[in-house]
């Protein structure tokens, strides 16, 4: 069955976010044999919409129409939502939710962004600058329910996927440029892009020279009224420079992607200039870079990922990453009050202020010594064309959005998995449980199910023997004369196991069909991880299945692994998978505990350096059993005592690390 993917994004807008959205869909399109794609188009600011009538636009229109019809006819359930926007707009629309954003151009993200980010399962952003701002932003706060002081930070994984390079045939733009040497500025007219200073300081530098600046700009769209606004703004800027020899050209209105790319290769356009206070990525700078056009910009922002490239050191011969553009000096200062945006650009955030003198000096250098900067730009182009290859970036985006599911690992190549199950008073659950677990994609080829009957008062054995006969190579059954407790059973299962990977499976819970396979794949692909876990859907009805349940996306959404997070909540919860070697290093479960012994085991291992990892999205179905050990209200008193004892034991613990000399 194909996975249903909902993309909510400004797929039809002429903007950086629009290009980001179309890039995402191109990456997913390469996997339509596995995906059923749906699209909800949204606006992006005041940007206009693309009007192309090409094959890609027709494909987008079909997806949009299909989605609208599907939503009218039925309550469609998606498997994954991918939302391309600023984080304020992110929502939980499916069991797995991925937020895609260019991030913020300042030094910190807002608390709202962090709250929304923590609602998602993963974040994909476009540059190291954007990722680092997310990770570096921390707010002090108070937990709404407990009143405890806490730190608000991003707890979800953040991955970076850059834009890919594109190749277009050049078209004749028929630009009437009177000057032979022209700089280019491409930006929406607004405070962040700093166009006024870009123009004003350019004019002051070349007031007595025949040099031009082409300004491709708009304010709120590409209408005739907007053109008038831009013309008026430029005219007002130039009032005090009536006798200048330099020229400023306004380029306004819709341009095709071929026409925009032809700007960067026009023989009279020699360099791109940008004095933006910040860029999440910098699409125009990127397009200039892979077009071989020199760039003048501050050495701060998202575009450093592609404007800085490896270069051999003349003295040592070693490669070092160095700027391949004309670097304007800058200061980091608070964002202007008029540019603040509640919930997005916070009052205490800062951004880059390019220095006037440095900008003018770089303009002068590029103009006078153009050959040197052109040569540098050509070297950068070669590196960018290889590093940001379209097929490579499309594959990275698909893998980042949809996980290692797109890394093919044959099931038979995965190590053996030992599933440990305690059988006690489980008449109601035993047959549905066995039916469910034996349908796991990895079961027959890679699994042994160790069923330990803890002197149960029930009649489960008849059903168990029926399945042992059906799966003699996969099921091991042992009946005890005395119940040693849940962790005594688990320890016995660990000792009986022959698999490299271990997991527990509770009689009243269920798994997604590929749950064991996907958990094992994560361990297989990352040898540094000792345990993996995933979110779980929650149901109040017994014996429901993954494919037919009443959870309605209600779920345990566990935080990403850190030792501090583990001290607050048992993230591995009811269905982790771990390496058997973890017990050789850190011992078995402490049998004195009745409910929280697994939490103590994981804390013990993590405090001594074991690393855990969360898998994106839910892979299990948790039955909130009113008679269960951990969910029965009658057990809450002693359960709380256990948890308090464990917390006190580890609350001051620091992660132990071994250093090899």
Image (cartoon, helix red, strand yellow):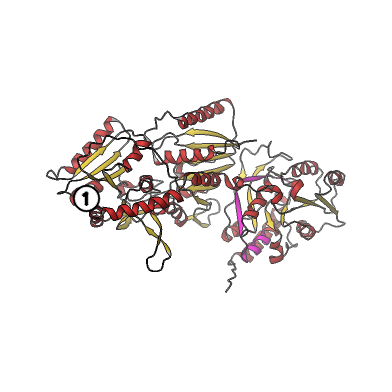
Q: Nearer the viewer, residue 57 or 331?
A: 57
Image quadrant in which the C terminus is located: bottom right
**Residue identifier under label 1:** 201
In this rendering, the answer to whether 599 lies above or below 546 is below
Query: Does the segment drawn in magenta span residue 454?
Result: no
Q: Nearer the viewer, residue 333 or 530?
A: 530
Q: Position of residue 430 (x, y in %)?
A: 80, 44
Q: Position of residue 574 (x, y in %)?
A: 68, 51
Decide if residue 108 is in sight here. no
Q: Position of residue 41 (x, y in %)?
A: 46, 33
Q: Indicate the quadrant where residue 373 lies.
A: bottom left
In this rendering, the answer to whether 171 lies above or below 652 is above
Residue extent of the magenta highlight? 599-628
Say few, some or many: other residues with alpha carbon within 10 Å of mark 1 (under 14 / 14 to 19 / 20 or more).
some
Q: Position of residue 516 (x, y in %)?
A: 69, 48
Image quadrant in which the N terminus is located: top right
Q: Residue at x 33, y 33 (%)?
A: 254
User: In the rendered view, does 75 fall on the left or right side of 438?
Assistant: left
Decide if residue 595 is in sight here. yes
């Amino acid at each position: 069955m194909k996975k249903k993917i909902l993309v909510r994004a400004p797929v039809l807008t002429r903007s950086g976010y629009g290009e980001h959205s179309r890039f995402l869909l191109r990456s997913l399109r390469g996997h339509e044999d596995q995906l059923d794609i749906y699209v909800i188009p949204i606006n992006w600011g005041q940007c206009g919409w693309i009007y192309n009538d090409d094959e890609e636009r027709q494909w987008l229109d079909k997806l949009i129409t299909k989605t609208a019809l599907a939503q009218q006819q039925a309550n469609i359930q998606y498997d994954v939502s991918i939302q391309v926007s600023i984080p304020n707009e992110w929502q939980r629309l499916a069991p797995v939710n991925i937020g895609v954003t260019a991030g913020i151009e300042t030094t910190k993200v807002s608390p709202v962004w962090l709250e929304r980010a923590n609602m998602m399962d993963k974040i994909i952003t476009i540059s190291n600058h954007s990722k680092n701002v997310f990770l570096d932003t921390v707010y002090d706060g108070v937990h709404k329910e407990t009143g405890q002081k806490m730190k608000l930070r991003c707890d979800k994984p953040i991955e970076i996927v850059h834009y890919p390079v594109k190749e277009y045939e050049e078209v004749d733009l028929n630009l009437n440029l009177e000057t032979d040497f022209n700089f280019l500025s491409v930006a929406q007219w607004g405070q962040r892009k700093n166009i006024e200073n870009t123009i004003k300081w350019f004019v002051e530098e070349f007031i007595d020279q025949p040099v031009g600046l082409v300004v491709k700009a708009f304010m709120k769209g590409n209408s005739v009224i907007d053109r008038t606004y831009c013309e008026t703004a430029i005219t007002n800027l130039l009032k005090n420079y009536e006798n200048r020899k330099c020229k400023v050209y306004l380029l306004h209105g819709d341009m095709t992607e071929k026409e925009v790319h032809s700007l960067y290769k026009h023989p009279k356009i020699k360099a791109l200039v940008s004095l933006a206070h910040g860029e999440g990525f910098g699409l125009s700078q990127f397009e200039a870079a892979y077009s071989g056009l020199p760039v003048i910009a501050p050495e701060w922002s998202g575009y450093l990922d592609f404007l800085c490239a490896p270069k051999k050191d003349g003295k040592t011969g070693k490669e070092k990453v160095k700027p391949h553009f004309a670097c304007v000096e800058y200061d980091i200062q608070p964002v202007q009050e008029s540019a603040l945006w509640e919930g997005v650009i916070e009052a205490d955030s800062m951004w880059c202020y390019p220095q006037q003198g440095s900008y003018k000096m770089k303009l002068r250098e590029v103009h006078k010594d153009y050959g040197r900067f052109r040569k540098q730009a050509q070297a950068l182009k070669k590196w960018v064309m290889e590093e940001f290859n379209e097929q490579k970036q499309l594959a990275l985006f698909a893998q980042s959005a949809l996980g290692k599911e797109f890394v093919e690992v044959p099931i038979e190549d995965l190590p053996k998995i030992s599933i440990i199950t305690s059988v006690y008073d489980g008449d109601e659950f035993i047959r549905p449980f066995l039916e469910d677990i034996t349908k796991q994609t990895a079961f027959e080829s890679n699994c042994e199910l160790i069923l330990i009957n803890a002197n149960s008062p029930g009649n489960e054995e008849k059903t168990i023997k029926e399945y042992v006969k059906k799966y003699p190579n996969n099921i091991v059954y042992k009946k005890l004369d005395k119940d040693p407790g849940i962790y005594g059973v688990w320890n016995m299962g660990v000792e009986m196991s022959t698999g490299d990977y271990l997991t527990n499976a509770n009689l009243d819970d269920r798994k997604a069909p590929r749950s064991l396979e996907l958990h094992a794949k994560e361990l297989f692909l990352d040898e540094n991880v000792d345990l993996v876990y995933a979110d779980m859907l929650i149901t109040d009805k017994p014996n429901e299945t993954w494919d037919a349940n009443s959870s309605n996306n209600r779920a345990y959404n566990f935080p990403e692994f850190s030792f501090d997070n583990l001290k607050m909540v048992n993230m591995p919860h009811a269905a982790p998978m771990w390496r058997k070697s973890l017990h050789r290093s850190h011992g078995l479960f402490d049998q004195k505990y009745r409910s929280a012994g697994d939490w103590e085991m994981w804390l013990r291992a993590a405090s001594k350096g074991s690393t855990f990892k969360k898998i994106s999205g839910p892979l299990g179905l948790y039955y909130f059993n009113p008679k269960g050990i951990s969910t029965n209200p009658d057990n809450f008193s002693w359960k709380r005592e256990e948890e308090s004892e464990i917390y006190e034991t580890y609350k001051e613990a620091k992660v132990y690390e071994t250093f090899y000399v």
